[in-house]
Image (tube, grey):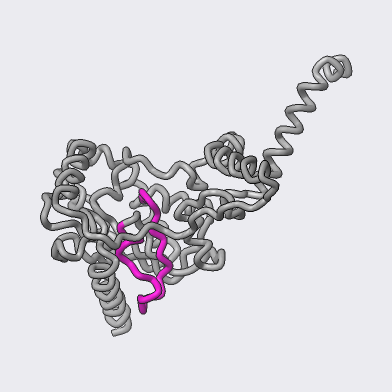
Amino acid sequence: MLSFLKKNGFVLGLMIAVGLTNAWISWWNPMESSLRFYKNDFTKTLYHHNWSRSGPVFFGNSSVTGAYIEEKSSSHLVEMGLSYGKPTDLKEILQRNLYQVNDELVIGIDVQTMLDKLDTDPTYQWLKPWYQPYVYTYRDYFRDSGEEFTRNLSKGSLAYQPRWIDKELYFEHKDPAWLKAKWEDYDKRFGWMQLKDMQASIDALQWVINYATEHHLPLRVIWMPYHSGYPHPPYTASLKEDVNRRLQASRIPTLDLMDKYEPKYFSDLVHLNRIDGAPLFTKEVDAWLESLKKSSKS
């Protein structure tokens, strides 16, 4: 053993040093703690709520971020719309105890929420394999911040540009040509999909339903608005049938707003305009949730 250590001491020492460095950087967690680095939408949610990790939640993808105006809502739900968010993400958040959902959980499902094959933000905390070094996982963002640090240091400065910490909202009205091109792109990329291409998300949603039942957590589901000037993706009907069957079996209240709003309230195909559509949506959701509370007391 002593001979082995002597022959391989340098390599073993290097491995220990790398391991300790990775442990320290993971503990520091600059992707969350430092404004020098990019923040994903989950971290942005925590940041804008004073790093609180508990409360009632409105979960979904960017359609929820665009449509639900938390500061104008009487429901006081934490807006947890995640870019490309899916039920698989919510399952991971709950399983890993990254956020404790209290009092009420509302899930917004739009025409893209359940697509397993839709690319997501790779920086979400739950997507990092346990064995993968922290610096390697977020190497692009370390490179970006490192290059900025080097440039500024060469000028004798330690200053840096804080990274954008707000979520993307949708104010403009896209023109018909842009909308048509986007619909054609969606149809080409996703129109061929069937329920089997959403099975992981469907299974995760069922897991969340079971979780809510076991933890006596009131769960509500909203079918998010879609631009009525364009056809639904071909898989929409079968998806809604399957999901609604599961929700009805567990007596989960459901609000279908998919075809509720006129085109003038949209910014694009799946995001309500912040000026016109989002206030209307927020008021309607508030009224629905309040009606559920009143009916439960009667």
Query: Extreme front residue here?
Result: 155
At 49% from the left and 44% from the top, the residue drawn is 123
Query: Extreme bottom residue here?
Result: 298
Q: Nearer the viewer, residue 253 or 16?
A: 16
Question: Could you tell me how many numbered marks the image carries?
Answer: 0
Q: Is residue 13 left or right of residue 58?
A: right
Q: Quadrant of residue 121?
A: top left
In x, y percent, where is residue 103?
43, 71
Asked if residue 157 shows in the view, the reply is yes
Q: Is residue 279 left or right of residue 92?
A: left
Query: Extreme right residue here?
Result: 2
At 84% from the left and 20% from the top, the residue drawn is 5
In x, y percent, where is residue 114?
29, 47
Q: Nearer the viewer, residue 249 or 255?
A: 255
Q: Quadrant of the N terminus?
A: top right
Q: Nearer the viewer, residue 138 or 171?
A: 171
Asked if residue 129 shows in the view, the reply is no
Residue 212 lies, with reference to residue 190, above or below; the image says below
At 77% from the left and 24% from the top, the residue drawn is 12
In x, y percent, where is residue 205?
34, 52
Q: Quadrant of the C terminus?
A: bottom left
At 34% from the left and 54% from the top, the residue drawn is 61
Extent of the magenta region: 63-86
